Amino acid sequence: MPIAEPDLDITSDQSLWAQIGESTGIDPLLLYSIALVESKGLNSRGEVTPTPWLFRVNDHVVRGDRHEVQLAMAAATQFGAAVKDVGIMQVYYPVHRNTVRDPLVLLNPRTNITVAAKILRDGMKQTRDPVLGVGYYHSHTPALARNYGTLVLSVYERLKAIYRRAADEKIAEG
C-alpha cells in the first residue's frame, strides 16, 4: 500500500503547517516561509513550493521523489557519508542528531517540520529581536542570523499580504 503524500498545502486548514503551528504556537506561515527559503522548487503545476524530498551530503544536494531520495540517503548513511541538511526545512543533522538519531527520519515532513519548529522556537526565546530570533534558526553568528532573519521575514510579510487578501476576498464573496 503506497504511503499518502503529506498535506503541505499552506491554504489547507488540515495541512502539516497548520497542525504543527497550532501545537507549537508558531504561525504556520512563518514555518512555511522558512521552508520556502530552505527548499523551494517547482511543483508539478509549475508553482514555487517547498519540497520535502531532498538532503545535502558531501556538499552535494540530492533531490527527487520520495523513493529516490530515501534510497540515496540510505546508501549515503550506509557508506558513512556526511549527511547535512535534511528535508523540507533543511534541518542540519550534525547539530540535531541527538533529537533524531537517524537522518532518514528527518525526511518525514511531520518530523522535519516539528523539529524545525522547536529549533525556531528555541532561537526566538534567546532574544527579543524578532529578526535575530528567526535568524538563529540558520546561524548564531549575528551577521548571518540577521541576514537570514531579514530574508525569512520578508517572505513571511509577502505571504501574509497574499493570504490576507485572499481571505478578505473569500469573505466578500461569501
Image (cartoon, rainbow, N blue to C red):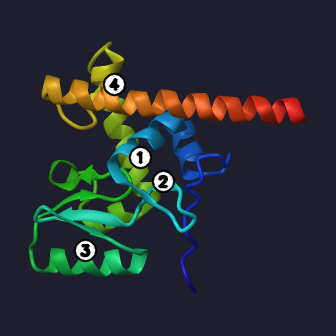
Vertical side of 78 occupied by 8: above or below = above
**Of the numbered discs in the image, which one, if any, rests on residue 124?**
4
The quarter of the image holding the N terminus is bottom right
- Which numbered disc flags the more N-terminal residue, 2 or 1? 1
Alpha-carbon neighbours of circle 4 within 10 Å: few (<14), some, or many (≥20)? Answer: some
Q: What's the amino acid at mark 3?
A: Met
**Residue holding disc 1:** 36
Residue 155 position within the rendered picture, expressed as x and y whole percent measured from the top left: 44, 34
Q: Give how far apart the Cα atoms at labels 1 and 3 are.
A: 22 Å
**Residue holding disc 3:** 73
Of circles 2 and 4, the one toward us is 2
- Kindly indicate whether the residue at mark 3 contacts the one at mark 2 (C-beta within 8 angstroms): no
Q: Residue furthest top?
A: 128
Q: Residue furthest right?
A: 174
Q: What's the amino acid at mark 1?
A: Leu
Q: What's the amino acid at mark 4?
A: Met
Residue 83 position within the rendered picture, expressed as x and y whole percent measured from the top left: 17, 64
Residue 151 relative to residue 25: left or right: left
For label 3, the SS is helix
Q: Give how far apart the Cα atoms at labels 2 and 4 are.
A: 27 Å
- Which numbered disc flags the more N-terminal residue, 1 or 4? 1
